[in-house]
Image (cartoon, rainbow, N blue to C red):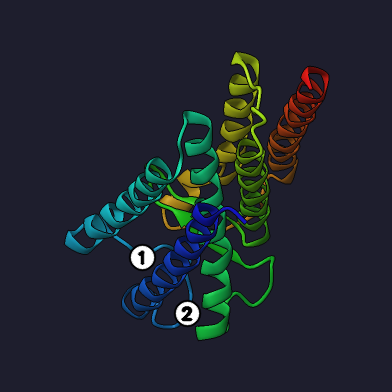
Amino acid sequence: MNRMLGWAIVFGVSMGYFEAAVVVYLREIFAPEGKLFPITIELNSLGWVELGREAFSLLMLLAVAMLAGRSVKERVAYFFLVFGVWDIFYYLFLKLTIDWPESLMTWDILLLIPVPWIGPVIAPSMVAISFVVMGVFVVRMEDRGTTFRQGRRCFAGMCVAGLVIIVAFCWDWRHIASGGVPRSFPWLIFAVGQLLLVGIFAFYYRSSLRSAKAIS
């Protein structure tokens, strides 16, 4: 395994534990009875600190990706990789420490920036697994001297897929922000985004491998 890849995974696992630990503390403050909904975090001093923590967590992932990658493609791949590992181990450590979530269908608050993102645990976990696979594949490909050949269409398609997934997570944000509890998750919208994400990546990954074989 690429040494940098290994350390990136270690960082993702470590960040997953820190994130889980912080959330354990936050639950003692904002949800001592274990109920995440209705959301009780207000935009007071603690609320702004939490928003800042979320923003700087993403910045930390970006910083690691910028340091680990040698090109724009590798940096994007490392960002996806570390993000995915972080999210997977975040839930794993929560399960080990406070026995939560009860199941993969348990509702969770994913982010609060700029509006509440919510969804069953299985949904962000599926995205995280996809991120890890895509990140590892691109990094290993680049290590072997094969270029992941994506163009504007690939970039645009991935952006659309990501936007569709975000729409699914934020679909009911007004209801949640106004003190409501989760009602239903837009699985169809999420599935479209997830399939687009995986399908576009698989298409361009295979195209890159075929191009490399043709050149050799």
Question: Which one is nearer the viewer's eye here, 28 or 142?
Answer: 142
Q: Eyeballing the image, is 156 above or below 119? A: above
Question: Which amino acid, mark 1?
Answer: Thr
| Nearest to N terminus: mark 2 or mark 1 | 2
Q: Position of residue 64 (x, y in %)?
A: 39, 49
Q: Which residue is mark 2?
A: 34
Q: Which residue in the rendered view is the most extreme toward the front?
A: 216
Q: Which residue in the rendered view is the most extreme toward the left?
A: 45
State the residue at coordinates (43%, 44%): 65
Q: Eyeballing the image, is 28 above or below 74? A: below
- Regarding residue 118, the answer to whether it shows in the image is no
Q: Horizontally, is 211 left or right of 36 in the view? A: right
Q: Residues within 10 Å of mark 1 (few under 14, many from 20)?
A: some
Q: Label 2 vs label 1: CA separation?
A: 12 Å
Q: Horizontally, is 86 left or right of 42 in the view? A: right
Question: Which one is nearer the viewer's eye here, 11 or 88?
Answer: 11
Describe the element under mark 2 as helix, strand or loop. loop
Q: Which residue is mark 1?
A: 40
State the residue at coordinates (59%, 14%): 152
Q: Position of residue 10 (x, y in %)?
A: 49, 65
State the residue at coordinates (64%, 77%): 102
- Regarding residue 90, the answer to whether it shows in the image is yes
Q: Eyeballing the image, is 139 above or below 87? A: above
Question: Which amino acid, mark 2?
Answer: Gly
Q: Position of residue 128 (x, y in %)?
A: 61, 53
Question: Which one is nearer the viewer's eye here, 216 or 93?
Answer: 216
